[in-house]
Amino acid sequence: MAVVLELQRVSKQFGSQHAVRDVSLGVERGEFFALLGPSACGKTTTLRLVGGFEQPTAGTILLNGNRIDHLRPYERPVSTVFQNYALFPHLTARGNVEFGLHQKQLTAADIHRKVRDAFDLVQMNGKEDRLPAQLSGGEKQRIALARSLVIEPEILLLDEPLSALDPNLRKQVRSELKALQRRVGTTFIFVTHDKEEALSMSDRIALLHAGRLVQTGTPQDLYLRPDNRFAATFLGQVNWVGSAAVRPELTRITRDPPFPGVRGVNGVVESSTFLGNCLHIAARLPSGDKVIAEVARADSDFQTGEPVHLWWHAQDELPGLSEG
């Protein structure tokens, strides 16, 4: 696929604070691309730089090979879905969706057709005449998406659009948003601090920390082949055993010694945490370190204080990492 957006050594400084430091990355056309990281890592500032709401202190931003970092937001072929959706409270759902089309000086017939198609796309038929105050959180998000997509942007920017939804609705909307992106084919750049959202929805992820780009790759790359300790631990729990790093779901726990050829340590069961579909069994090693093994509920009869063996296959270790 062709690169539609490119950031070349982009930095943003607010006074003495470096929000973004020397970030270079490329986003391919039609990708669902996530900017992931903890609070204050620079992901929202990076999104605002692409949208034109902030200007870079240094570096270049290219869209389809053309420099856009000097353009105002309305001069860029991008659209943004904000965290609070930013719907006009005095306009109906239809009025919100068609607002951007009026700026393009289209005919009434073209506006009517595009708005109808947008409501079909986000499955909000019958809600056209409702005000934002009459819509649920999920419905507001769909109207915000329709308003952004109806103007046919090159790139849709989404600034943590699921954060205001309750957990169950978030999971439902997550799958709907991914399916929507596949249907329209528009490049999505999605900001989130939720690793589960990024892993489940994205084609590729850019992981940021303290304003710097830590690693870019597919969800599988970042989870199974992290470049460093921060990437490994941010994407999920890690057992650090000597110089080995292994995920809990790949760590086995047994009463009997493991068969030859695997790597393992001895420990004593310290606690068991129920997680619904599985349990985390924590065992303390002679060194004082703690190792967690994820087990099915059917294998949950380990008792506190019981000696156990914890083991894993060499190929399951996260490559190139050590405790230091």
Image (spheres, rainbow, N blue to C red):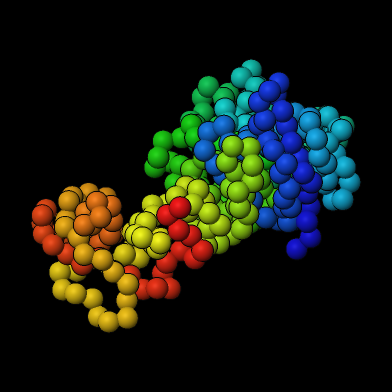
Q: Position of residue 51 (x, y in %)?
A: 74, 35
Q: How many marks?
A: 0
Q: Position of residue 149 (x, y in %)?
A: 70, 42
Q: Position of residue 100 (x, y in %)?
A: 77, 31
Q: Quadrant of the N terminus?
A: bottom right
Residue 129 shows in this picture: no
State which quadrant residue 217 falls in.
bottom right
State the residue in front, 194 or 323: 323
State the residue in front, 277 or 36: 36
Which residue is at a point 51% across and 24% down the rendered structure image?
134
Residue 204 shows in this picture: yes
Q: Is residue 73 above or below residue 284?
A: above
State the residue in front, 297 or 315: 315
Which residue is at a point 28% across and 52% down the rendered structure image?
289
State which quadrant residue 73 falls in.
top right
State the residue in front, 247 or 201: 247
Considering every residue shown, the one lying at the far top of the view is 90
Q: 12 left or right of 228? A: right
Which residue is at a point 61% across and 19% down the rendered structure image?
89
Considering every residue shown, the one lying at the far bottom of the view is 260
